[in-house]
Image (tube, rainbow, N blue to C red):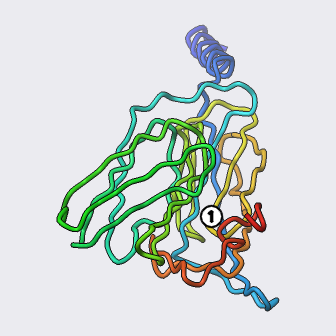
Amino acid sequence: MPDHIQHITSAVIALSLALASSGLTAAEIRGTVNVQQTGLFSARSDGLKNFLVSVALYPAEGQTVPRRAPVRHSIVLSSQIQPMYLAIPRGDRLNFENHNKVYHELFTHSHSQPLVVQMDREGLGSEKSVTLNDVADLHWFCRIHAKSYLRIDVVDTPLVRMVQAGESFEFRDLPTGKWRLRIAAPGAETKTLVTEAVTAPPPLQVQMTVKGFSQGGVGVASPQAASIEQLFPSQPGI
């Protein structure tokens, strides 16, 4: 083999070994979350679209995750709350925006982090912000409007994706190794699974079942059709 070719080959091998040892390979995790809806008294199930699902990724083997500056998320208060579901990294801020001339008094159904946001009817276009620093699943209700509902999942990772049911999610440029996925949606049991980040992986297929809970559109809830057991499937009788 000519010397110059041998030198190039050696350099490529050395670079590959360096990248592998540092974990800076082009590994990724990708997949699709499919959601089925079942009635409370029926075994029939239907595939859902336009249903918001969160996918959060955690290192399972001590991998380093990228740092990320806090982000502000807009929550619109009108006849309903939009979006009605959101998963965010801890440290992010919710910015509540009043879009109608009525009172709103939101509170969380959380024992560990009770919060209240009050918006008066003269505050059309007004805003109030809340920073969420504690990991929790926060279920927000309104003391005035029975149909208002908002769920915020605060997670301890910057790697979060919000997708609609049936849409693909992906996490790219990951260190190789095992990672833990958290998949959640309103009215469904939260799923956790361990997968591996590799180059060009086959897409994961995750199935979830929602019982008796519906969203009236993208990011719009229909909470009048939901009971407490449907909103809190892992805490019956709360």
Q: Viewed as shown, does residue 45 lie left or right of 146?
A: right
Question: Which kind of residue does numbered mark 1 sit on?
Answer: Ala
Give the residue at x 65% y 47%.
Answer: 29
Rendered position, 86 above or below 158: below
Between 157 and 186, the one nearer to me in the picture: 186
Q: What percent of the width, then of the height, locates residue 168?
A: 57, 62
Q: Secondary structure at mark 1?
A: loop
Task: Determine whether, in the image, residue 187 is placed left or right of residue 40.
Answer: left
- Residue at (61%, 53%) from the top-left corner? 55
Quarter of the image that includes the N terminus:
top right
Where on the picture, by quarter, is residue 223?
A: bottom right
* Residue carrying label 1: 185
Q: Local crowd at mark 1 within 10 Å, few (<14), some, or many (≥20)?
A: many
Residue sitting at x 76%, y 61%: 235
Q: Is residue 56 left or right of 207 when viewed as pictured?
A: left
| Snapshot quadrant of residue 117 | bottom left
Q: Nearer the viewer, residue 168 or 2?
A: 168
